[in-house]
Amino acid sequence: MDSSLTQLSPQKLRHLIRAGKYTAPTSGLAPGYTQANLVIVPQDLAYDFLLFAQRNPKSCPILEVSDCGSKKLHTFAQDVDLAADFPRYRIYRNGKLAQEVTNVSAYWRDDLVSFLIGCSFSFEADLIAAGIEMRHITEGVNVPMYNTKIALQPAGRFSGNMVVSMRPLPAAQVVTAVKITASMPRVHGAPIQIGDPAKLGITDLAHPDYGDAVTVNPGEVPVFWPCGVTPQNAIMHTKPAFVITHAPGHMLVTDVKNTALKYE
Amino acid sequence: MDSSLTQLSPQKLRHLIRAGKYTAPTSGLAPGYTQANLVIVPQDLAYDFLLFAQRNPKSCPILEVSDCGSKKLHTFAQDVDLAADFPRYRIYRNGKLAQEVTNVSAYWRDDLVSFLIGCSFSFEADLIAAGIEMRHITEGVNVPMYNTKIALQPAGRFSGNMVVSMRPLPAAQVVTAVKITASMPRVHGAPIQIGDPAKLGITDLAHPDYGDAVTVNPGEVPVFWPCGVTPQNAIMHTKPAFVITHAPGHMLVTDVKNTALKYE
């Protein structure tokens, strides 16, 4: 990635994205700052979705909820336009992907509520700093993600199963990885399963349901974390008439440092 | 307290309370089990209240939200009747205390949503186990609580300032107390202020706004934690037509152990 890009502040990056001059994935940008997933629903679905997230905090950790109709935030970014500051959005109609666009200002409605959801980019930087290889980064692919048989707590019109991400780790590094990620529950927290994919209903690590397969070397243990794809999946399951999300990998770069998401 | 009472299981205690045979405060009952505060609001206020709690998790840590109209829970207790299992309830009309009763079955409505909110009883047991005296328990009084000038993040119709509880600690025990309580954010977590009441807008420790004053000995530091009185205060501030809460000190005894509320 262009080093002049990685040195930009979150605010300058959002300005660039808002002007339509950056439309690519945000991985690696503004190192140390939290990036966030997005789900926008009409107000009549907002209570059910917020309750669903409250009941399933490991897979649906809410960072912030906008005021109804507002494109602004209170906490995670000051100079922000939620309709323009993600490089790419997806518009779903009746549960089906209808369009992928770089700006949703033309689709905005006064009854929309935006949910920012934690992203595991946050804990990956800390794991790497502790000397733990992130295989998907080394291999230059997307992290492998799998559907599981773990039923989530339903809430109102929302239900579904947990989606997990997988990172293979040398057995000797598993405890360190658990400790580091457990300290950051707002970006999914500790692993949900260590070493036994069958317990999650996963039959073939080589064929993930989302993202790409990665190499698992002899002596390495597959470690599974709750994944931010879960809330999008659950919301699509109910086939709502109109939903906007970010496009995978195309996150909001916020003004809040990852370290601020650790428990005080 | 009668030792035959403290040895009862949470379920047996709830049965006793449900039958109207125990109507006193629950402090000291079922040691090791989580007790919970209660706020019940009509559905039209539920989204605003849930959002208010999401934005102010230190003072309003939601343990569980009932389904609309339901007197049951999914997680914190199996055999439970939310209209009968608190020893004492308060009914507020237009923001004013209208009645205090031991059972709210006669007032139940299909549009009521119940919020269970974390209670600092949980971390007090751990502090005592670490050799830290809880002065209000030693002196046999209610914990002192104070209004502060810390404005909460507003949400919809709810706004207000944080209420804090205070415990005086020897300076040498403050770090231990921070570490223990920081591991339990679902029951208010780490202190919000250490040693400087003026920073919170508190002018006189000897005259708390709620509860009772306690002795602060030379060499002791007043330590302030966000308090579960906060959400009730905020909700009353909006003068809603109809709200039910528990009566202070008269909590729900749940089936979940305090240790389960620590981060995994």
Image (tube, coloured by chain):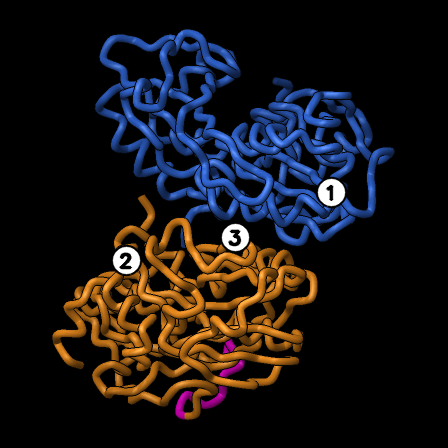
Chain colours: A orange, B blue
Q: Nearer the viewer, residue A206 or A58?
A: A58
Sooner in the amino-acid sequence: mark 2 or mark 3: 3
Instruction: Classify B201 as above or below A136.
Output: above
Alpha-carbon span between mark 1 and mark 2: 37 Å
Q: Nearer the viewer, mark 1 or mark 3?
A: 3
Label 2: state its secondary structure: helix
Which residue is drawn at the image coordinates 47% and 19% (left, top)?
Answer: B145
Residue denoted by label 2? A258
Q: Please, what is the three-letter code of the amino acid marked with disc 3?
A: Asp
* Residue A143 is covered by the magenta coloring: no
Query: What's the mark number on residue A67?
Result: 3
Find the magenta span and give its range. Answer: A199-206
Task: Specify whether disc 1 shares its chain with disc 3.
Answer: no
- C-beta proximity under 8 Å, tags 1 and 3: no
Q: Please, what is the three-letter code of the amino acid marked with disc 1?
A: Pro
Q: Chain of mark 3?
A: A
Which residue is drawn at the image coordinates 29% and 26% (left, top)?
Answer: B194
The quadrant in which residue B134 appears is top left
Q: Nearer the viewer, mark 1 or mark 2?
A: 1
Dominant secondary structure, magenta: loop
